[in-house]
Amino acid sequence: MSEKLSDLEAQMHGLGARARDAATKLSHATPADRTKALQAMAQRLRAAGPLILAANEEDVARARENKQTAAFIDRLAVDQKRLEGMAAGIEQVASQPDPVGAVMAEWTRPNGLRMQRVRTPLGVIGMIFESRPNVAADASALALRAGNAIILRGGSDSLQSVNAIVAVLREALNESGLPGDAIQSVASADRAAVGMMLAGLSGTIDVIVPRGGKSLVGRVQEEARVPVFAHLEGVCHTYVHAGADPQKAIDITVNAKMRRVSICGATEKLLIDRAVLADLLPPIAQALESQGCELRGSEEVQAIWPMERATSEDWRTEYLAPILSIRAVENIDEAIAAIGHYGSHHTDAIITEDAAAADKFLNEVDSAIVMHNASTQFADGGEFGFGGEIGIATGKMHARGPVGAEQLTTFKYVVRGVGHTRP
């Protein structure tokens, strides 16, 4: 092993050991202790605004020098409004009920044994993410609310921003009497650090949460030796049913695609019933193009509104850019089948005034989030009342959809007897 790799390994295992020790201390803290620390984190974040914005300017300038896309820079950039959003999100988490110790279920057996299922922290969370510096604040707050320590590894492009945010949050923890090591970031941009986290850092990491592109998530799922909360790409669909209100179809589709194109909840595919294609495609297409959206469609769609021909790859692509692919479907069954085939089980929506069709869609589409007459851009932990999210889990184990504080707990069984022995 090279001296450089040996040094990195020592640093990473040191992070893990300190996180494990901090997690143990957090498990003994009270809900009031955690609330006080969260409030301090929000206050500190606001006070340190100039420092964080300056660090982010360095990251953004480097991204521009490296010719990164506009969508990438949008995800990377932090301004005063986004900084305030981070602080407000932490305050919202602070105002939520503390999940640790909550009784999920309780019952008494015929023999008199009293049993409870009680929420407990997961322990140490390893968070691997790309681009978005706000993830550091959101994830740290949610981890703390659930009594967990967290090790953050942001992308090399956001290194300065993430380190600045984490330094501020650690100061707030120390001042509040909780261990600053409950929130740590990996200072090295070396990709070997990711591999070490995926191996579990000698058993100190309990779960890995990846948040980023397909290549990152693929690597995590392939290499991880600890449980993973999978956050796959957001190939989100909006389906305009024959029973859609025309104005809602226009307004919702434009918002779902164009409000913010770089987030995972942005609609990437539009499905329209053939029965209303000729009537609804032109006004929807015109509204999208007026906001700078590039349209790609099937031959059938092109015949009604001029646009580029969509390729087979387009139907599976998460653009994260002002690009939308459009196809016609015969009915709701064909729409559901297309979403199942091409989608990523993230977020999918139907626009219709037909209650039966809406219920069928909501019941049969197998995605983490399904919506009726609402923009897919609501696929966000803050909009769910979670105060943010550590990611949108698209798998089916443990957590699914926005992962908030409650989803960052596990449970144990507490059994109370009065001298019971088993015959």
Image (spheres, rainbow, N blue to C red):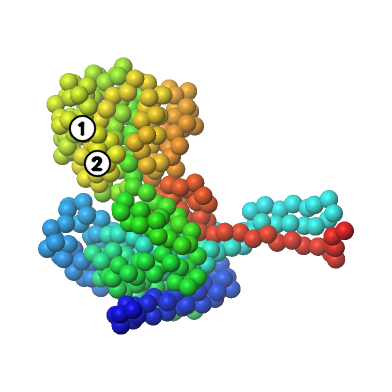
| Rendered-image quadrant of the C terminus | bottom right
Tell me: residue 327, above or below residue 17: above
What residue is shown at x 40% (from left), y 60% (from top)? 223
Label 2 sits on residue = 258
Give the residue at x 39% y 56%. Answer: 222
117 to 361, vertically: above or below: below
Callout 1, which amino acid? Ala
Q: Would you say residue 218 is visible in this rendering?
A: yes
* In the image, farthest residue toward the top: 275
Position of residue 111 in the picture relative to residue 288 (left or right) = right
Indicate the position of residue 340 as horizontal and vertical percent values: 40, 34
* SS at circle 1: loop
Q: The N terminus lies in which quarter of the figure?
A: bottom left
Distance Cα–Cα, label 1 vs label 2: 19 Å
User: Quick one: 81 or 205, which is closer to the camera?
Assistant: 205
Secondary structure, mark 2, is helix
Q: Earlier in the sequence, mark 1 or mark 2?
A: 2
Q: Residue at x 44, y 24 (%)?
A: 357
Tell which of 237 and 16 is nearer to you: 16
Tell whether label 2 touches label 1 (CB within 8 Å).
no
Residue 367 placed where, x, y %? 43, 39
Q: Residue furthest front?
A: 1
- The residue located at (28%, 71%) in the rendering is 190
Q: Residues within 10 Å of mark 2 (few under 14, many from 20)?
A: many
x%, y% of residue 145?
50, 64
What crowding class fits label 1: few (fewer than 14 Cα within 10 Å), some (14-19), or many (20 or more)? some
Viewer-proximal residue among 55 and 418: 418
Residue 140 visible at all = no
- Amino acid type indicated by mark 2: Met
Badge number at residue 152: none
Q: Which residue is mark 1?
A: 310
Q: How many marks?
A: 2
